[in-house]
Amino acid sequence: MAQVLEFKLPDLGEGLTEAEIVRWLVQVGDVVAVDQPVVEVETAKAMVEVPCPYGGVVTARFGEEGTELPVGAPLITVAVGAPASGDALGPADPPGRGAPAGQAEGSGNVLVGYGTSEAPARRRRVRPAQPTAAPATPHASSPAAAPARAPLAGATPPAAVPQALSGAATAPVGVPVEAGSVRSPHPASDGPVPVISPLVRRLARENGLDLRQLTGSGPEGLILRADVENALRAPAAPVGSEAARPLPDTVATPAPGTADGRRIPLKGVRGAVADKLSRSRREIPDATCWVDADATELMRARAAMNAAGGPKISLLALLARICTAALARFPELNSSVDTAAREIVQFDHVHLGFAAQTERGLVVPVVRDAHARDAEGLTAEFARLTEAGRAGRLTPADLTGGTFTLNNYGVFGVDGSTPIVNHPEAAMLGVGRIVPKPWVHEGELAVRQVVQLSLTFDHRVCDGGTAGGFLRHVADCVEQPAVLLRTL
C-alpha cells in the first residue's frame, strides 16, 4: 500500500512569507528521489530550487508557473512506500519507494518544518464539506483512498500517475474558493484569523480592514494579499445584501482614466524593492550632501596597481576601501536605529552592500567584513556576488545584513543622484560617472577626471557636521589616495 505525503512550501528563512513558482522541475507521474529539486521559486530575496524530502511518485502539483504561494501552502504530493502486490520496482527506483508500507525515507536536508531523518507517517484530517460544497465522490470515502489535499486552482491533475498507485490520489472534496475573495456575509466573531503573512496583516491594519470579514482564496481559507487588495478595491456592501454575495469572475472596475493602462503586479524582487523603499521614506528622515572631487590621482593609482601584475583591481574595490576607512573615522554612519528601544546601534564591523542591476531588477548583495579585506579581496568578492546576481544564484544570506551601502550609479552614465537609504541602514554613498572636466589644479585650469560624490544619511544618527566630515574624507582619499596610507 502506497502512502501519499504532502510536501508544503517550506520556510525559506529571513522572514520570507511567500514565493512565486518560476519553473516546475518535475511532472505528475515522475519518480523523484529524496532531496531532488522539484520546483524553482523566486522570493523577494533570491531564486532558489526547493528539494523534496520524500522519495516516490509525484501524484499532484499545486499551482502553475507564475503563481504566488504563501509559506505552508502545498507544493506537491508524493506516493511513497511499497507498491501494490506483484509490481516490481525498477533498478533505478529512488530512496523511499522500497521502504516498508506506511514508511517513508526522510530527507537529509534541513528544511523548516521537515525532519532530517525519517519522515513521519502523517495523516491529514478531512474537513467536513460545507453546505455549499459539492457532494464527495464515492471513492473519496473509500478505505483505500489516501487523504491528499485537493489541488489549488490551476494545479495539474494526477492523471498521469501509474496504475499501481492510482488508488493513492483522491478527487477534490468540495468546491474550491474562487480567487479574489469578497467580504463574507457571516464573519466569524472569534477564533484565529487564517493569515500567515505579516505583510497581509499590516496591509489590512493600515487600511482599517477587519480580516474576519474576508473569505480567503488560499488553501483551507488562507487569506492572501490578493484577497485584501480585492476587498479594498471593492465597495463595501451591507451584510446579507445581494451585493455581499460572492459573484463568479467578478472584476473590479478600474478607476477613470486607467481602463487602457497595463497593470504590472508588484511582486518578487520589484515588490520587495517597493516595500523597502517605501518604508525607508516613511521612517527615515534622510538628508543628502554632495561634493565634486578630482579622481585623476585615484585613476592613476589603479592603473599603476594593475600594471604591477597580479589580479586586476576594480575601481569599485578602491571606493569600498575608501568607505571602510571613512567609516572607521565616523562610526555614526555605520549604524541603525532601533525605533522600539529608541536606541542607535553602532556596528563594530562593516558589511558593505553594493547596488547591482540584474535582469531580475535591482539587488544589493552584501560583502561581509569588508573592513577586513584588502583591495584584491574586495575585487574578488564583488566579482563573485555580481556574477551570482546575474545568474540568479544569490541566497537570502547574500542579500541581508548590510550596515552601509555603496551605490555606483555612474555606470549608467549619470553624474549625480539622491539615493534612498537602504533600510534599516543609516547611510548610502553614491558615486557618479568619472569624466574629463575643466578643473583648477595647482592654481591653473586643467582637464581632470572629475566625479560627483553624494551621501544620503539618516539625520537621527548624526548631524550635518558628521555627514560632511565623512564625505570630505572620502573626497580627500579620492583626490589623494596616499591619505589611505595613514589607515593601513
Image (tube, rainbow, N blue to C red):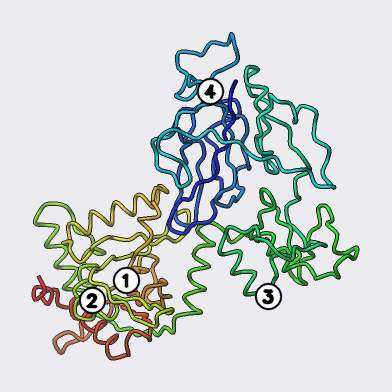
Q: Using the numbered discs, state the Cα–Cα distance from disc 1 to disc 2 in whole angstroms.
A: 9 Å
Q: Is residue 333 above or below residue 140?
A: below
The residue identified by callout 1 is 404
Image quarter where the C terminus lies is bottom left
Q: Using the numbered discs, state the Cα–Cα distance from disc 1 to disc 4 in whole angstroms.
A: 52 Å
Mark 4 neighbour class, 10 Å CA radius: few under 14, some 14 to 19, many 20 or more: many
Nearer the observer, 164 or 355: 164
The residue identified by callout 3 is 208
Given contact means CB atoms under 8 Å apart, are the residues at marks 1 and 2 in contact? yes
Image quarter where the N terminus lies is top right
Kindly report which numbered mark, 1 or 4, lies closer to the viewer in this rendering: 4
Residue at 33% x, 69% y is: 405
The residue identified by callout 4 is 81
What amino acid is at disc 1?
Answer: Phe
Coordinates of residue 100 in the picture (x, y in percent): 50, 20
Mark 1 neighbour class, 10 Å CA radius: few under 14, some 14 to 19, many 20 or more: many
Nearer the observer, 202 or 68: 202
Residue at 86% x, 59% y is: 245
| Dot 2: element | helix
Mark 2 neighbour class, 10 Å CA radius: few under 14, some 14 to 19, many 20 or more: many
| Dot 3: element | loop
Q: Using the numbered discs, state the Cα–Cα distance from disc 4 to disc 3 in whole angstroms.
A: 50 Å
| Dot 4: element | loop
Q: Quadrant of residue 209?
A: bottom right
Sequence order check: which comes first, mark 4 or mark 3?
A: 4
Sequence order check: which comes first, mark 1 or mark 4?
A: 4
The residue identified by callout 2 is 327
Coordinates of residue 68 in the picture (x, y in percent): 60, 51
Q: Quadrant of residue 459?
A: bottom left
Coordinates of residue 220 in the picture (x, y in percent): 68, 49
Kindly report which numbered mark, 2 or 3, lies closer to the viewer in this rendering: 3
Sequence order check: which comes first, mark 4 or mark 2?
A: 4
